[in-house]
Image (cartoon, rainbow, N blue to C red):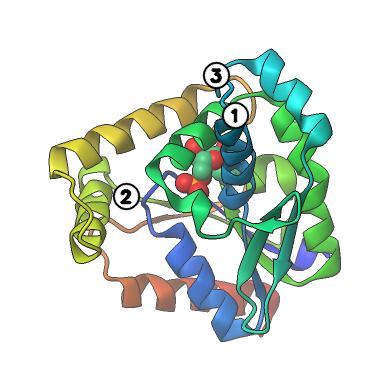
Amino acid sequence: MEERSIAIDGPAGAGKSTLARMVAGHFGLIYVDTGALYRTVGLYVLESGRDTKDAAAVTEMLHTIKIDMHFDADRRQRMTLNGRDVTDLIRTPQASLAAADVSAMPPVRAFLLSMQREMAIRYDIVMDGRDIGTVVLPKAGLKVFITASPEARAQRRFKELVAKNVPATYEEVLRDILLRDKSDTEREVSPLKVAEGAVVLDTTEKSLEECFLWLCKIIEERFGL
Ligand code: DC
């Protein structure tokens, strides 16, 4: 039910998905990552060889795409694209860029909206994205906007890439973050912004543990747990 849902929004790299996954595990909720939906549409367009910025071509392709989101025995979200599991494939930098392009197109957002709302009807969820509290679940029982300075977000992403042996420089990662912020906040449809009634968590100077405890406390208070 929407009123029992937790909506988490914020810019790329602020720690949304890590925190959403942690609180979902703690309270026995299902974590829904909506960025994965946009990534799956982006991958479909990429694989077809069409231009991911061509709104007419992308809109036409929505007639032939079948996206399914389901949860495995460990409650981990898996994505299928026309019957093929693409859970890992959607994580490439190319899929990120394609997702940013297609997410700015109103027909793509409309196409993915009902799938997201159905999740909130079917499960008790923590859902993260850019427009969850503003558009997808405006009546969510708790809305949280998680943010951090671009430099702190770039530093964290850079460390993750180094740990995975992915070649990148801090400057490149920061540039990518700033570009994504610009496209997320300046697009006409469902831009990233703080939802009415949302609580804001700035993670710049806070440890993951501090943020997690803060969120747990707010959830307990809000839902009377
Ligand atoms: O959170 P992410 O990096 O997986 O998101 C991929 C892209 O999709 C990103 O450019 C923002 C966009 N997105 C969106 O517009 N709305 C959402 N609810 C989730 C993601």
Q: What residue is shown with label 3?
A: 53
What distance separates the C-alpha of mark 2 from that of mark 1? 25 Å
Element carrying mark 3: loop
The first of marks 3 and 1 along the sequence is: 3
Residue contact at pointers 3 and 2, CB within 8 angstroms: no
Front in this rendered view, residue 61 or 224: 61
Q: Check disc 3: other Cα within 10 Å, few if <14, some if 14-19, many if 20+.
A: some
Front in this rendered view, residue 73 or 151: 73
Going by the numbered disc 1, the residue's amino acid type is Val
In which quarter of the view is residue 203 placed?
bottom left
The residue under the point 58% across, 51% down is: 36
Q: Is residue 164 left or right of residue 94?
A: left
Q: What residue is shown with label 1?
A: 102
Q: Is residue 150 above or below residue 147?
A: above
Image quarter for ligand 1 equals top right
What distance separates the C-alpha of mark 3 from that of mark 1? 7 Å
Q: Is residue 174 above or below residue 71?
A: above
The residue under the point 21% across, 53% down is: 158
Going by the numbered disc 3, the residue's amino acid type is Lys
Judged by depth in the image, the label closer to the viewer, 2 or 1, is 1
Q: What residue is shown with label 2?
A: 148
Location of the C terminus by quadrant is: bottom right
Q: Is mark 1 within 8 Å of ligand 1?
A: yes
Residue 8 visible to an observer of this rendering: yes
Residue contact at pointers 2 and 1, CB within 8 angstroms: no
Residue 210 percent across, percent down from the top left: 33, 75
The residue under the point 42% across, 38% down is: 94
The first of marks 3 and 2 along the sequence is: 3
